[in-house]
Image (cartoon, rainbow, N blue to C red):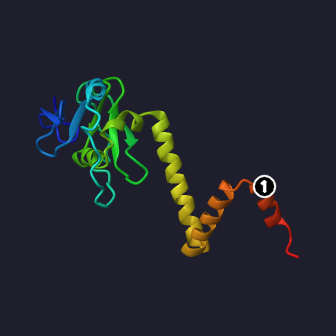
Amino acid sequence: MKSPVNQQDLQKQDIAPGLAALVSPADGGIWLDLATYQRWLQRRVENEDEALPDTGSEPLAETSPQALFCPQCGALLQKYRLSSEHSARLDRCTPCHSVWIDAAEWAALVRTGSTHSLLQVLSDAGQRSIREAETRQRQHARYRERFGADDFARLQATRDWLNAHPQRAELLAYLQKPAD
């Protein structure tokens, strides 16, 4: 089978202990059969995939922004966001139940201990959650710009305090009354 990115032959290799995939020797891209991945998840030891500390590396950019085609069936691969912090996208072939993962994307999943949540990322709920997080980040950025970083931080702290307070409704009613 050939890489959907560079058309070079893929080679079978373990990308994690007990998880075999087809890997591109040229760029480290990974063609992962999701049925194989699911079987690996079911038998993996609980602490085998511990999260490594995030070293604060820069956000991942998409390394294959062009449309890719499945090396098995030729279908157009669908792009799925990896997270709200990264513009990188996983490329999935729904008919073949497989996914193309660039080397940097797999490294980020390993570094953050997220190799076990790949199916969640690829789900509708996972993608919706990522879009909602991006929307919140954009809203927060607009509020920081509008109010200033210090005032926005104070507003957030006040909102958190109000939301946790048992007399929240009364406090909000008081705040909405005109000053005496």
- Image coordinates of residue 38 in percent, x first then y, are 31, 26
Q: How many marks?
A: 1
Query: What residue sits 37% from the left and 53% below the top?
Result: 86
Q: Which element type, helix, strand or loop, lies under badge 1?
A: helix
In terms of depth relative to the viewer, which is nearer, 23 or 126? 126
Q: Position of residue 25 (x, y in %)?
A: 11, 41
Q: Which residue is the extreme one toward the right?
A: 180
Seen at 47% across and 46% down, the residue is 130
**Residue 160, picture quadrant:** bottom right
Q: Amino acid at mark 1?
A: Ala
Quadrant placement of the C terminus: bottom right
Q: Nearer the viewer, residue 19 or 130?
A: 19
Q: Nearer the viewer, residue 111 or 119?
A: 111
Picture layout, residue 6 above or below residue 96: below
Image quarter of residue 54: bottom left
| x and y percentages locating residue 2 in the rendered image | 16, 33
Left of 112 or right of it: where is 148?
Answer: right
Of the pair 23 and 166, the residue shown nearer to us: 166
Question: Where, by quadrant of the figure, is residue 77 drawn?
Answer: top left
Q: Which residue is mark 1?
A: 169
Q: Is residue 166 above or below residue 147?
A: above
For the N terminus, the image quarter is top left
Q: Give left or right: position of 46 versus 12.
A: right
Image position, residue 118 (x, y; %): 35, 36
